């Protein structure tokens, strides 16, 4: 006879409390995904370079139009608080000092992936769709392409477009700011 083991899932509040009491430290590279504390992969040089490139390009957007976040948490649900690589957020007067962003405040979310590309695509992008994040970019450093996800629903994104080297892309929120895929990939 087999016994199904039950997992103890955590809330965002409990997850934050773990840092406050010293169970987790600010330096721990973890995120809360559907109630589970997930260790994040080490950041390689190419990954870091891509994040820096995107940060540089998006820093051209005036602050009254968007707030730029880099590897900062966003609270999707009571049990999910990932730390995407780059986000463009609706501006808030407090610069998100009083609370982490929520899905309705996300204009564009970017995950840069090398060793975790399958997890990011299959798990995290699905969660972003269920949270109705309007646009997600997945920078696939393995296949050297950019996957753009749009038109979210609880069942996933209904529009998925792949961009390759030699092409340019712009977000829905900032259609005049085109970014070269070559620039993103390095």
Image: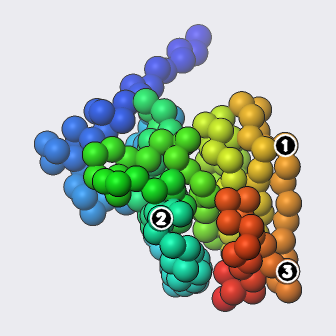
Q: CA distance from mark 3 to mark 1?
A: 22 Å
Which is more N-terminal, label 1 or label 3? 1
Few, some or many C-alpha atoms within 10 Å of disc 2 (few <14, some 14-19, many ≥20)? few
Which of 155 and 69 lies nearest the eye of the viewer? Answer: 69
Few, some or many C-alpha atoms within 10 Å of disc 1 (few <14, some 14-19, many ≥20)? few
Say what secondary structure mark 3 lies in.
loop
Q: Is residue 89 visible?
A: yes
Which residue is depicted at the point 44% across and 32% down? 79
The residue indicated by pointer 1 is 158
Left or right, 117 with respect to 100, comes to: right
Find residue 93 and name its label: none
Q: Could you tell me residue 87's position as x and y percent?
A: 53, 61
Say what secondary structure mark 1 lies in.
strand
Image quarter hosting the N terminus: top right
Find residue 64 and name its label: 2
The residue indicated by pointer 3 is 167
Q: CA distance from mark 3 to mark 2?
A: 28 Å
Question: Looking at this rendering, what residue extends furthest in the top direction?
Answer: 1
Which residue is depicted at the point 84% across and 54% down? 160
**Which colour style is shown?**
rainbow
Q: Nearer the viewer, mark 2 or mark 1?
A: 2
Which residue is depicted at the point 22% across and 38% down? 17
Q: Could you tell me residue 98's position as x and y percent?
A: 28, 46
Question: Looking at this rendering, what residue extends furthest in the front direction?
Answer: 64
Which is more N-terminal, label 1 or label 2? 2
Residue 184, compared with residue 122, is above or below; it is below
């Amino acid at each position: 006879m087999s016994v199904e083991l039950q997992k103890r899932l955590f809330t965002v509040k409990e997850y934050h409390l773990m840092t406050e009491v010293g169970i987790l430290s600010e330096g721990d590279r973890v995120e809360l995904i559907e109630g589970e504390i997930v260790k994040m992969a080490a950041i390689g040089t190419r990954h870091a370079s891509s994040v820096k490139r995107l940060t540089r390009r998006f820093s051209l957007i005036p602050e009254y139009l968007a707030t730029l976040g880099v590897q900062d948490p966003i609270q999707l649900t009571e049990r999910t608080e990932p730390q995407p690589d780059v986000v463009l957020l609706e501006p808030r007067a407090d610069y998100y000092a009083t609370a982490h962003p929520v899905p309705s405040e996300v204009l564009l979310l970017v995950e840069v992936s090398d060793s975790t590309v399958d997890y990011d695509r299959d798990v995290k992008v699905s969660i972003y769709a269920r949270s109705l994040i309007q646009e997600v970019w997945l920078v696939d450093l393995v296949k050297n392409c950019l996957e753009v996800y749009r038109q979210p629903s609880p069942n996933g994104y209904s529009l998925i477009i792949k961009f390759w080297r030699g092409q340019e892309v712009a977000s829905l929120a900032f259609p005049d700011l085109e970014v070269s895929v070559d620039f993103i990939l390095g």
